[in-house]
């Protein structure tokens, strides 16, 4: 059986992140935290830095908390119900680990499986309201002889069916092994029914890039909870509904310095809002040992993508 830790880690990483982005980062993460015990023993900052760039950082905080719970218990949970009791683990991840790593007939329902089920049973209820209906229908697969004989392979086959044949656009129905029993085949391209997208509001911020004589970047650290909780950041203002003027932004600077505005803006999209960021920079020398100065390459590695965009903006303006 596959290692439950590796199955769990891969499933968490793949939530909202593409396979292409995850593949190299999965191996790097395992290189730094090869076992659940190693992850549990690591400082939270080390875990968050290793997760930088993958987005949805609450996943990393929950992963770390769950690893500590497993280490304290001395063993992995024996079934999906036990996995669901851990921080950050919902029905999908619990079922995936149970099926793939524990060989139990659990049906993990992700977006691919929802699409397969919506088409197979011609579910016209719009998303996301249809999620409960689709999850209930998917549980019918748990009694399938193939699922009971090889749960992990059956779960992987469901994922692959949705990813390669029952695709969002132009589904290859002629190649589908379930085409003869598919109630929604004639309208497959329109299923599942999607609710109209609500435009995301725009927020605005200003950030302050401090460089020392060696070209190192001064980093801050976000609060442990909330958006990007616990991650390194480039100090800045709150993100508000109105743009910041120079005077307003400079009044929020972390300390007095000859701040200069960098031309242009950096843009980033979050799930519920879009963000426009201005950038100011200064060459400074701040005495003391409590500041977190990092070489530019290291800063780029540990910063979340939203703040990496500021480094790209600075580099494009010749700031280094």
Image (tube, helix red, strand yellow):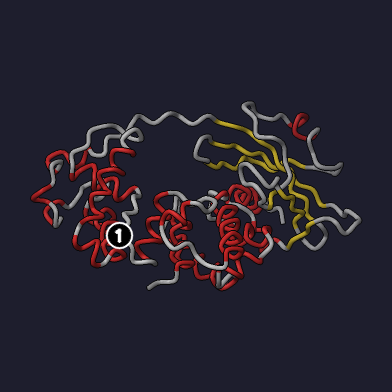
Q: Nearer the viewer, residue 183 or 83?
A: 83
Q: Would you place residue 96 above or below residue 116 in this image?
A: below
Q: Which residue is mark 1?
A: 105
Q: Nearer the viewer, residue 279 or 180?
A: 180
* Extreme-right residue of the structure: 287
Q: Residues within 10 Å of mark 1 (few under 14, many from 20)?
A: many
In the image, taking residue 174 as reference, residue 13 lies left or right, namely: right
Coordinates of residue 300 in the picture (x, y in percent): 64, 58
Please identify the quadrant where the C terminus is shown: bottom right
* Extreme-left residue of the structure: 180
Q: Residue at x 65, y 34 (%)?
A: 239
The local secondary structure at tag 1 comes to: loop
In the image, taking residue 85 as reference, residue 282 lies left or right, namely: right
Coordinates of residue 171 in the picture (x, y in percent): 20, 49
Q: Residue at x 31, y 44 (%)?
A: 135
Q: Residue at x 45, y 29 (%)?
A: 199
| Residue 163 quadrant | bottom left
Please identify the quadrant where the N terminus is shown: bottom left
């Amino acid at each position: 059986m596959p290692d439950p830790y590796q199955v769990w880690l891969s499933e968490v990483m793949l939530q909202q992140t593409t396979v292409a982005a995850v593949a190299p980062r999965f191996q790097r993460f395992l290189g730094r935290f090869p076992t659940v015990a190693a992850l549990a023993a690591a400082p939270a900052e080390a875990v968050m830095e290793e997760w930088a760039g993958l987005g949805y950082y609450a996943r990393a905080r929950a992963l770390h908390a769950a690893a500590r719970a497993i280490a304290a218990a001395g063993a992995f949970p024996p079934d999906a119900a036990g996995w669901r009791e851990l921080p950050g683990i919902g029905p999908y991840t619990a079922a995936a680990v149970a099926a793939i790593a524990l060989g139990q007939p659990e049906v993990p329902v992700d977006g691919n499986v929802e699409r397969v089920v919506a088409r197979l049973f011609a579910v016209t209820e719009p998303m996301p309201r249809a999620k409960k209906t689709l999850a209930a229908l998917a549980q019918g697969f748990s009694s399938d002889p193939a699922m009971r004989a090889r749960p992990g392979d059956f779960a992987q086959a469901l994922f692959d069916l949705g990813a390669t044949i029952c695709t969002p656009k132009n589904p290859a129905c002629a190649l589908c092994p379930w085409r003869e029993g598919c109630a929604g085949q004639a309208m497959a391209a329109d299923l599942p029914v999607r609710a109209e997208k609500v435009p995301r509001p725009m927020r605005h911020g200003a950030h302050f890039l401090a460089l020392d004589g060696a070209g190192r970047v001064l980093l801050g650290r976000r609060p442990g909870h909330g958006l990007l909780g616990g991650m390194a950041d480039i100090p800045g203002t709150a993100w508000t509904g109105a743009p910041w003027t120079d005077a307003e932004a400079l009044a929020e600077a972390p300390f007095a310095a000859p701040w200069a505005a960098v031309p242009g803006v950096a843009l980033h999209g979050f799930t519920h809002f879009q963000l426009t960021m201005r950038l100011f920079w200064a060459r400074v020398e701040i005495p003391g040992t409590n500041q977190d100065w990092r070489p530019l390459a290291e800063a780029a590695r540990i910063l979340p993508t939203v703040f990496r965009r500021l480094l790209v903006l600075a580099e494009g303006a010749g700031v280094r």
